[in-house]
Amino acid sequence: MDPVTQGALGAALPQSMRVKWSGHRKTHAALAGLFGMLGGMAADLDILISSSADPLLFLTYHRQFTHSFVFVPFGGFIVALFLYGILRRRWTIGFWQTALLCSLGYATHALLDTATSYGTMLLWPFSEARFSWSIISIVDPLFTLPLMASVLMAGVRNEPRYARIGLAWALLYLGAGWFQHQAAREVAESLATSRGHMPLRYEIKPSVGNLLVWRSVYETEDRFFVDAVRVGIARKVFEGTSVSKLYLARDFPWLEPNSQQARDIGRFGHFSDGFIVVDPAKPNRILDVRYSFVPNEVNALFSIELSEEAGPTEHVRYQPHRENAREQFDRLLRIMFDGGAGN
């Protein structure tokens, strides 16, 4: 999830414990929150692993070893080394206490990321499988703001019970996300059946910032079908579109199988779990069909772009897409509040 949410949850766990962390009694919860927050955000430093020569390198390492269970004590230890060197003269807190607080915060990071839809390698190096529960969006203010408030109250008042309230809210909200996910899948399965389809697999994920509207992507033999479903008291389907699966021989007949661009497509496909298609708006662009700001559209959040003129050792071009964000957000709001066409 976003760094603010990761920091807030990382702070809440050590704050929730009524333990004497330092000699300054009135700052126990504040210190615990600070170290837990920094530990909770640290795992995303893997975004620094990048290369101008290889635009897909960061995809390989994001949510990889820094997000595994095995790495938690090492991650907490590294953060503690940095912090202890700076803060040991200011606060009377031992190194191993600092390491424990940072590790507690660090441990929350991968679990929260797994609740989103991106995929997290929890079992690295034993497995490179990406785990994803898809029960919350990567940005959700309704989850984050109460959690932040509880952390601030715990720090200001030096009272663990406020952090416990925040943790309880986080668990309840994630539980609600699981319930909504199951409801959205039921609607998606009914929709596929009504069309006479027998999907090979489904991908159900919340749209940006809410648990009300969900993106449904299901796969048939040759196509992906994309729709939005709103669940709750008044369930509703907002039918979208379908797009053909990627077939290299048909879509890029000029591509050399042993070229770097062909290998990059394989890497992108592995990351995207095979949910890759040619962008309907641009035939030399490949996108991950699981993601779009508007849940019933095929509109890339990111893509790779190929060039027919590229040499055999040249990489694809990676591109994030943030254009027309305001217009897309307006379309999402219309679906959320019943201003779009549905059935």
Image (cartoon, grey):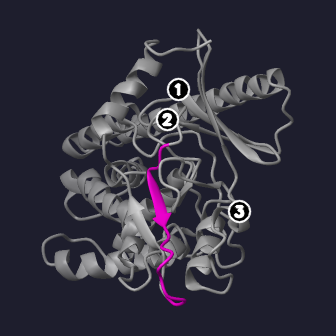
Q: Are marks 2 and 1 in contact (CB under 8 Å)?
A: yes
Label 3: how many Cα within 10 Å (few below 14, some 14–19, many 20+): few
Q: Earlier in the sequence, mark 2 or mark 3?
A: 2
**SS at badge 3:** helix
Q: Are marks 1 and 3 in contact (CB under 8 Å)?
A: no
Residue 311 sits inside the magenta stretch = yes
Q: Residue 250: which disc?
A: 3
Which residue does the image show at 34% across and 36% down from the upper left?
162
Badge 2 amino acid: Ser
- Count numbered badges in the picture: 3
Q: Where is residue 303? Give x, y as percent.
A: 48, 60
Residue 118 sits inside the magenta stretch = no
Side (left or right) of 58 relative to 42: right
Badge 3 amino acid: Arg
> Residue 3 lies in what quarter of the image?
bottom left
**SS at badge 1:** strand
Real-space CA distance between mark 1 and mark 3, rounded to the nearest whole angstrom = 35 Å
Asked if 217 appears above or below 245 in the picture, the reply is above
Q: Where is residue 206? Give x, y as percent.
A: 54, 35
Which residue does the image show at 71% across and 62% down from the upper left?
250
Magenta residues, start to end: 299-313
Real-space CA distance between mark 2 and mark 1, rounded to the nearest whole angstrom = 6 Å
Q: Main secondary structure of the magenta part?
A: loop
- Decide if residue 102 is in sight here: no
Label 1: how many Cα within 10 Å (few below 14, some 14–19, many 20+): many
**Which residue is disc 1 drawn over?**
213
**Which residue is disc 2 drawn over?**
207
Badge 1 amino acid: Val
Q: Where is residue 71? Give x, y as percent.
A: 54, 75
